[in-house]
Image: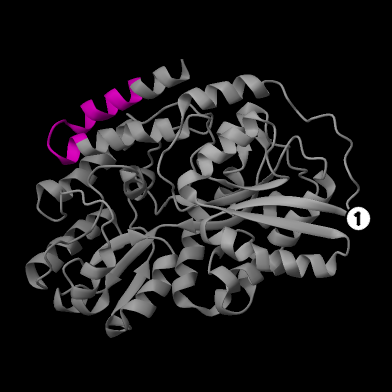
Amino acid sequence: MHRAARTTSLALVAASALTLTACGGSGKTDVGADDKQTLTVWAMGTEGEKLADVAKAYEKAHPGITVKVTPVGWDVAHQKLVAAAAARKLPDVMQMGSSYLGEFADMGALEPVDTKAFKQGDFFPAAWDQGIYDSQVYGVPWYVDTRVLYYRTDLAKKAGLGGAPGTMADLQKAAEAYRDKAGAKWGLSIQPSGLDAVQSFYPFLYSAGGAILDDSGKPVVNSTAAVKALENYSSYYSKGLSDKTFRPGYDVMKDFNTGAVPMFFSGPWIVGLLNDNYPDIKGKWAVAPVPADKASVSYAGGSSLAISADSPHKAAAENFITYLTDAKGQADWYERTKDLPANTQAWNGGELATDENLAVFRKQMETAKALPADPKLTEITSKVDEAIGSVTQGKSSAKAALDKAQSSIESLAG
């Protein structure tokens, strides 16, 4: 998911949770999959704008089914979903961002996925894991993203580097060489503080063997591995290799184009933006997997598709989701949006099978990690944002900051 601003209304969340406690459906009789009916669907951002065209194609192949798609902006998506859940008026099908699913599954607002209809083995492991809450699957993977390293190959030669850094130690040496030998202002762009700084930190954390929550959902953010990762992360600021000033809305591509910033971590959408907006550096940059510490592990994002527990159209909703998430539907969705398919079979043909840059993202997705779904995930990650900012600004040691975050996260579980 392209993360929205945190607009959570805690009072509204609490009210909706009380309303939906133990609810598993409205008691309405489900309409048959092939009966005449209207499916309501909410999708966010660009996906919401593009999905209507797919819905029209689906309707042609499924006479009697009308698919009504409502685009919802990411900036208001959370509050609209919460309000609809509280009123038990969620759409039949909805896009679930990776940070949302646990919250709405915990409310009882989502229908469990039929794991006979949707097979875990068809999807990237991390994509499937995003749809699990309390050992139950509630979301079918729709698209994925992960973070890899973008780097200037022409400046690498000028800096005396043989290619992409393979380890975290090599990454810092490369940052120093870019700055000292290739004239870059900074060696690496990573976010020093502010909202969602944690997303910039994930490649360091996961590659070191650390995590925020373990597989059971227990907070482990002050582990030895996590402290080591944050010490490494903050060293880029103490050594003058990264800009410690947080600039909201900062566009790293502009500085990548000029060479002021020769390396940064980001997702697949950047490939097209660089090609379209900065043609002068085409052929002068490449992508590479996250440099390894204990391993090369990155963050897995994306979105799932979920069915409302109160929907009277569950059979038709399941059919529509199948259409969107099988290999053919996923390949078509990539052509329309450039969203990376969650279904691995979709990668076996066309551009997805032949493009060298896309191959790096596919390789990274095989080891990428997703945070366990948790009803308070945005609050949990905000505590890590605070810890990162405290350390990069020289106000705290990594150990002290993560101990504080650990305590705060534990208190959220109450």
* SS majority, magenta: helix
| Quadrant of res 136 | top right
Any part of residue 341 in sight? no
Mark 1 lies on residue: 34
Residue 115 counted in the magenta span: no
Any part of residue 142 in sight? yes
The answer to which of 319 and 29 lies nearer the viewer is: 29
Colour option used: one colour
Question: Residue 261, position in %: x, y?
Answer: 20, 66
Question: Residue 291, position in %: x, y?
Answer: 33, 58
Residue 398 counted in the magenta span: yes
Q: Residues within 10 Å of mark 1 (few under 14, many from 20)?
A: few
Could you tell me which residue is drawn at 64 percent across and 70 percent down?
Answer: 331
Could you tell me which residue is drawn at 13 percent across and 68 percent down?
Answer: 184
Whether 96 is drawn above or below 275: the answer is above
Whether 35 is drawn above or below 63: the answer is above
Label 1 sits on a secondary structure element that is: loop
Q: Tell me which segment is drawn in magenta.
A: 390-407
| Quadrant of res 130 | top right
Could you tell me which residue is drawn at 82 percent across and 51 percent down?
Answer: 316
